[in-house]
């Protein structure tokens, strides 16, 4: 079941995210956020964009969120999205379920475009984004240093709502 996140999900989200921070270059953060900091992130995302969690039974096993793409006014209809799944749950449909719910919520709030960056290599993330209709738009080469190596970041984007009219302000 996918549902909107609340502050009470912060502990589970922090636990899911921590191994990505400490053991991989998937994220360029170097210190896992505390539960309090994760609760702040959830609150900020839900106030302006969206944050959803996936439950298996009553346990949170993944999450996805959207946030501002850039802080310049002209970018306000675009958002950046991310998804994190508990280890061992790749290729189970969890990422698709989370992104499907997240992208629907972002479109309903008036956002027109979603963008995502993926540290390379990351075949699972590349495959998920392709399956969700994201298209490649470019790669930053050797942009991040983590775990003793330089890493590239590939960027993809997907249209959420196609319209040429002047957009209403995102809700």
Image: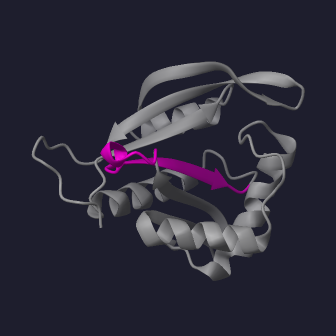
Q: Position of residue 120 (x, y in %)?
A: 67, 26
Q: Position of residue 90 (x, y in %)?
A: 66, 47
Drawn side of residue 103 relative to residue 96, left or right: left
Q: Is residue 39 toward the left or the right of residue 97 in the image?
A: right
Q: Is residue 59 visible?
A: no
Q: Is residue 154 left or right of residue 137?
A: right
Q: Quadrant of residue 168?
A: bottom left
User: Residue drawn at (43%, 24%), measured in percent from left and top?
Assistant: 137
Give the mark count: 0
Question: Which residue in the rendered view is the most extreme toward the left?
Answer: 165
Tell me if residue 46 is in the magenta stretch. Answer: no
Which of these two is toward me, 30 or 119? 30
Q: How is the image coloured?
A: one colour
Asked if 152 appears above or below 36 in the picture, the reply is above
Tell me which residue sits at (64%, 53%) in the image: 84
The magenta stretch spans which residues? Answer: 70-86
- Residue at (62%, 66%) from the top-left corner? 41
Residue 36 visible: yes
Residue 118: % across, % down: 60, 34
Q: Residue furthest top?
A: 141
Q: Who is closer to the viewer here, 77 or 50? A: 77
- Does residue 84 belong to the magenta stretch? yes
Q: Name the foreground residue: 37 vs 63.
A: 37
Q: Position of residue 36 (x, y in %)?
A: 74, 74
Q: Quadrant of the C terminus?
A: bottom left
Task: Determine the residue located farthest toward the front in the rendered image.
Answer: 72
As displayed, is residue 9 above or below residue 134?
below
């Amino acid at each position: 079941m996918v549902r909107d996140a609340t502050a009470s999900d912060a502990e589970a989200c922090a636990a899911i995210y921590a191994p990505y921070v400490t053991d991989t270059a998937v994220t360029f953060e170097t210190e896992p956020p505390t539960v309090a900091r994760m609760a702040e992130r959830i609150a900020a995302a839900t106030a302006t964009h969206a944050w959803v969690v996936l439950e298996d039974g009553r346990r949170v096993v993944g999450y996805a969120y959207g946030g501002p793409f850039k802080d310049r006014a002209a970018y306000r209809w675009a958002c950046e999205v991310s998804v994190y799944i508990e280890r061992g749950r790749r290729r189970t449909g969890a990422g698709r379920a989370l992104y499907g719910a997240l992208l629907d919520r972002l479109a309903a709030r008036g956002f027109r475009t979603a963008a995502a960056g993926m540290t390379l290599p990351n075949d699972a993330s590349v495959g998920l984004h392709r399956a969700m209709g994201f298209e490649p738009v470019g790669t930053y080469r050797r942009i991040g240093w983590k775990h003793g190596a330089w890493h590239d970041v590939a960027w993809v984007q997907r249209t959420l709502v196609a319209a040429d009219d002047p957009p209403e302000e995102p809700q």
